[in-house]
Image: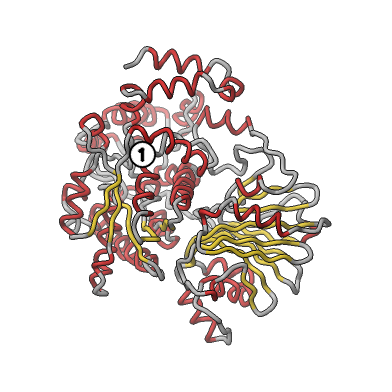
Amino acid sequence: MCGIAGIISTTEPILETSIKAMTDAMAHRGPNGEGHHIEDTFAFGHRRLSIVDLSDAGHQPMIYIDRYVITYNGEIYNHGDLRAELENVGYHFNGHSDTEVILAAYDFWGVECLAKFNGMWAFVIYDRQNKSFFISRDRFGVKPLYFCQTEKTFIFSSEIKPIFEYPGFEKRINYNYLNKYLNTGPQEHLAETIFQGVFKFPKASYAILTANEATDLLKTNKFWSLNINESSERFSQENALKYANRYYELLLDAVRIRLKADVKVGSALSGGLDSSSIVYLVNQLLREDGKIELQETFSSIFREKETAYCDESYYINLIIKQLNVKSNFGTVDESEITDLHYDVIKSYECPPDNTCIAGPVVFRTVKSTDVKVTLDGQGADEQLAGYLGYLNSYLTSLSFFDFLQEAPKVLRTPGTLKHVISAFFMLSFRLIFGWPRLVKVLNILGYNYEPNLNKRLKHDFDTALMNLLHYSDRVSMSYSIESRAPFMDYRLVEFLFSIPACYKIHNGWTKYIARLAFDGKLPDEVCWRKDKMGWPSPEEHWFRCTPLRRWFMDTVSQSALIQKVRPGLNLLLMIFLSKTK
């Protein structure tokens, strides 16, 4: 896990000071080393966080068979299997890093090598023979890659801050992006960013260009796409058990390959089903290898009476007690909130949808130990319908008879009444007038409604999930920690979107097959837990009942940016806060 940067020039000579300034701006992504490589038309830079092959054989930028030069950020979890396959056809390796495997794979398979990688990546490879640059980003955009183009250069980096270091780059706010943020929240799935002229390289894509083409409109190609099951299959308990078993097998192997590292690996633990499942599987795998003493978990908790509504200690302790793992708890004092907030904004390089304080609390706790990699639970909710809002699509798609059977079961979960009521009216409208008219009416009313649950999940997987993946990468790397996401294993993703939606929500339970898979393995209070929190922070208390209220009000009222983007908004926020306690 690292930080990469580069400059591809059409005419201008490239100075080492320029590429070094870029890599220095993201030293947190790679505190274990740095490297720079300059040839006639380009310069590559790299900051290294040593995870696999800690020796100098893993140093980057790396040159392979005197033909390819690479700067790369990420992990290819199946690099051992690919290495063996390539060795069988005559390739030789100097070390055991996945970087060498990427280069050999590209030499042997060309762009088809991307289909063989199981992992997360962002890299640029220069081919000295063809004088071309091969750029790629992983299937789900777990690893970031930004670029900007000037009249004479193509500049890329793992973060936006290094691009600011390029001589002559003018930092300008993208007010169009900010307006979208104010209307609909974070938009990390978009190509544009909060800064004009800086764009995200698309996920599941690659591009091949020469130095002369570096300033042309970038043309990218998709190497992977996700197919989904749109059927309305009725639930079968036999099939549910079959799917649950397959889900368990795939998640187990996703965890297994993500445990491979030359440093210590830990897990974030919130007390919810997703993180608890990962901690359980890590525990089982380490027990098989006789290395159970290596397991550690990390959690954020809130012990004070006023913030206890965000505390998940009860569920966390159930997992810790059952598995007998070493646990680490992080807390935050109110006096730290303002500094942590500024750190979040600096690392995220975009406005988030809340303070996101839980992330820094967890990862600074990880930083205080010798753990360098964590296995985390991003991605499960958007594949298994984990949020209560998905109940609406599910209930609306049922027959009226099935709705009457399912609705009382759904209502056993707190916070579902509004979903059941809205689903009742939409279902009634649908049965009388049909799906097309229902969708049309909802669109007229301003709701971009998707009635098919798997299609709705796919939409959120491609949009809202990108925000969470972005947050995870930035907060973990700001503390020089690598975060790995087993739920983002492409084999598991393809499987979950291939199964009918009726196995994701059933009998009032979201994530049904996931609960079925861990039934009897996790404590019932966790496996069949009804309330979902998901790393909450007590912002309601902080900004209404503590001195932070004044800080919040002053920050909003004095913001020239808010006034410019949305005149009067800061005044409205002030009025709202002044009337609430």
Q: How many marks?
A: 1
The answer to which quarter of the image holds residue 403 is top left
Q: Where is residue 98 shown, x and y percent of the image? A: 51, 71
- How crowded pointer 1 is (Cα within 10 Å; few <14, some 14-19, many 20+) is rated as many
Q: Which residue is mark 1?
A: 390
Task: State the residue lying farthest toward the right.
Answer: 11
Can residue 496 be seen here? The reply is yes
Q: Where is residue 400 shown, x and y percent of the image? A: 28, 34
The residue depicted at 35 percent of the width and 54 percent of the height is: 368
Question: In the shown orientation, is residue 255 left or right of residue 323?
Answer: right
Q: Is residue 124 above or below residue 562?
A: below
Question: In the shown orientation, is residue 4 left or right of residue 170?
Answer: left
Q: Is residue 332 above or below residue 13?
A: above
The residue depicted at 40 percent of the width and 46 percent of the height is: 382
Frontmost residue, 170 versus 444 = 170
Frontmost residue, 289 versus 412 = 289
The residue depicted at 60 percent of the width and 61 percent of the height is: 46
Can residue 435 be seen here? The reply is no
Frontmost residue, 572 versus 460 = 572
The residue depicted at 47 percent of the width and 50 percent of the height is: 478
The answer to which quarter of the image holds residue 321 is bottom left
Q: Where is residue 343 shown, x and y percent of the image? A: 47, 40
Q: For the residue marked with disc 1, what is the amino acid?
A: Tyr
Secondary-structure class at tag 1: helix
Q: Where is residue 148 shown, x and y percent of the image? A: 69, 47
**Colour mode of the rendering:** secondary structure
Which of the image's four quarters has the C terminus? Answer: top left
